[in-house]
Amino acid sequence: MRTFRLAAALAALTFALAACGGGSSTPTPASGGGSSSGGAGNGTPVDVTLADFSIDIAGGTNLEPGTYTFNVTNNGPSAHNLKIEGPGLDEPATPTFTSGTQSLTVTLKSGSYEFFCSVPGHKEAGMDVDVTVGGGGAGGGSTEDSSGGGG
């Protein structure tokens, strides 16, 4: 019983330390670009699932410009987070967490974004997804005619 309590206390301490780290306090330029905020928001809800070692964005990786609330669920046994880099953002991210769901509300404008886990080694292991905002179509940008036969 004593060993179990010690292990539980150590796990709680590790989780608390992981959740507190990784943030940056670099000032944001006063440019009026995109915005971001942690926590629940009024954006269009999008479910994101993290696992060892993948990121799945419900509805795909093509979004329209606008404000989104990403409801990020960790289904893996390891601690993960979701960080977003792209035009007008000051690197918003969820805390690093091991279970449950965290929400992240961001305003995305047209451009390319990178959604990834910033836990060391996780991005390189495959937790990295490119998202296109305002790309103008779900077909990947190709408009080739497919009437060329082929038999």
Image: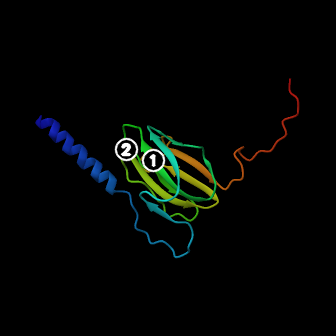
> Which residue sits at x=45%, y=42%?
50
Q: Are marks 1 and 2 in contact (CB under 8 Å)?
A: no
Q: Residue furthest bottom?
A: 30
Query: Disc 1 to disc 2, how far (Cα)?
Result: 8 Å
Q: Residue furthest left?
A: 2
Q: Which mark identifies residue 100?
A: 2
Q: Amino acid at mark 2?
A: Gly
> Which residue sits at x=58%, y=62%?
87
Residue 150 sits in quarter: top right
Residue 133 falls left or right of residue 147: left
Q: Amino acid at mark 1?
A: Val
- Disc 2 crowd, CA 10 A, few/some/many (<14, 14-19, 20+): few
Q: Residue furthest right?
A: 148
Question: Residue 16: x percent and y percent?
Answer: 28, 52
- Colour theme: rainbow
Reading the image, the residue beneath label 1 is 72
Dot 1 falls on a residue whose secondary structure is strand
Residue 2 sits in quarter: top left
Residue 145 falls left or right of residue 99: right
Residue 149 against residue 47 in the figure, above or below: above
Q: Which quadrant is the N terminus positioned in?
A: top left
Question: Residue 128: x percent and y percent?
Answer: 52, 46
- Disc 1 crowd, CA 10 A, few/some/many (<14, 14-19, 20+): many
Question: Residue 118: x percent and y percent?
Answer: 44, 51
> Which residue sits at x=15%, y=40%?
5
Q: Which quadrant is the C terminus positioned in?
A: top right
